[in-house]
């Protein structure tokens, strides 16, 4: 049986916090060579899981009922749009373990998220941002029906400073 058919897509639970934080740390390193503060990341993950008004994680779980493991994730946060009188769901923290990549894991999670978003009366769209240099992810997103918007993202980060970013070796 194809591995993608052995997957269960579900909302994350509090017992998933360590795995989700590890996935997010791995994603930050792979995509931006950024080493995140593990304690802060775990606390931030725990905060989101405990505060549904901030968003939620969806995870892909593989294996048998008595022995499962998480193999992928994405996080949804919310942005209110006064123009649309609705909420955009922002996809963030996308990660699939290396051995499960190119097997439809992200596709399955995204399908579940899109179905939920379309069924929710207050959701007006789904957005995500991607590192400019991450061409692999951009190709996947476009293949799955997402398209570049006319916006660029600007920020001023109050939490992470110059010492939080490491250079690759």
Image (cartoon, rainbow, N blue to C red):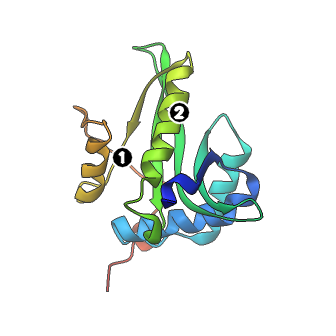
Front-lying residue, 140 or 23: 140
Residue at the front extreme of this rendering = 1
Q: Which residue is mark 2?
A: 78
Q: Residues within 10 Å of mark 1 (few under 14, many from 20)?
A: few
Element on which disc 2 rests: strand
Q: Position of residue 132 (x, y in %)?
A: 24, 54
**In the drawing, what numbered circle is on residue 95?**
none
For marks 1 and 2 on the same chain, the one whose residue lies earlier in the sequence:
2
In the image: residue 125, left or right of residue 167 = right
Q: How many marks?
A: 2
Instruction: Indicate the quadrant containing the C terminus: top left, top right, bottom left or bottom right.
Output: bottom left
Residue drawn at x 48%, y 67% is: 97
Front-lying residue, 148 or 116: 116
Front-lying residue, 9 or 138: 9
Q: Residues within 10 Å of mark 2 (few under 14, many from 20)?
A: some
User: Vertical placement of 158 versus 113: above or below?
Assistant: below
Q: Position of residue 166 (x, y in %)?
A: 38, 76
**Residue 101 in sight in this render:** yes
Q: Position of residue 126 (x, y in %)?
A: 42, 31
- Measured in 3D between alpha carbons, the distance from the residue under mark 1 to the one under mark 2, in whole angstroms, is 17 Å
User: Vertical placement of 117 versus 32: above or below?
Assistant: above
Q: Quadrant of residue 33?
A: bottom left
Q: Which residue is mark 1?
A: 155
In the image: residue 64, left or right of residue 115 = right
Comparing marks 1 and 2, which lies closer to the viewer?
2
């Amino acid at each position: 049986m194809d591995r993608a058919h052995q997957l269960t897509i579900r909302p994350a639970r509090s017992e998933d916090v360590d795995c989700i934080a590890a996935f997010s740390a791995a994603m930050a390193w792979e995509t931006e060579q950024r080493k995140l503060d593990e304690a802060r990341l775990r606390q931030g993950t725990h905060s989101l899981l405990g505060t549904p008004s901030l968003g939620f994680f969806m995870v892909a779980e593989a294996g048998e009922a008595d022995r499962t493991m998480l193999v992928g994730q994405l996080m949804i946060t919310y942005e209110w749009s006064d123009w649309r009188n609705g909420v955009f769901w922002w996809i963030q923290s996308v990660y699939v373990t290396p051995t499960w990549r190119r097997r439809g894991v992200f596709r399955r999670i995204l399908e579940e998220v899109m179905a939920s978003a379309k069924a929710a009366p207050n959701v007006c769209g789904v957005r995500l941002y991607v590192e400019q240099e991450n061409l692999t992810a951009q190709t996947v997103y476009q293949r799955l029906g997402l398209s570049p918007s006319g916006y660029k993202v600007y920020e001023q980060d109050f939490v992470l400073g110059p010492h939080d970013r490491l250079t690759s070796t």
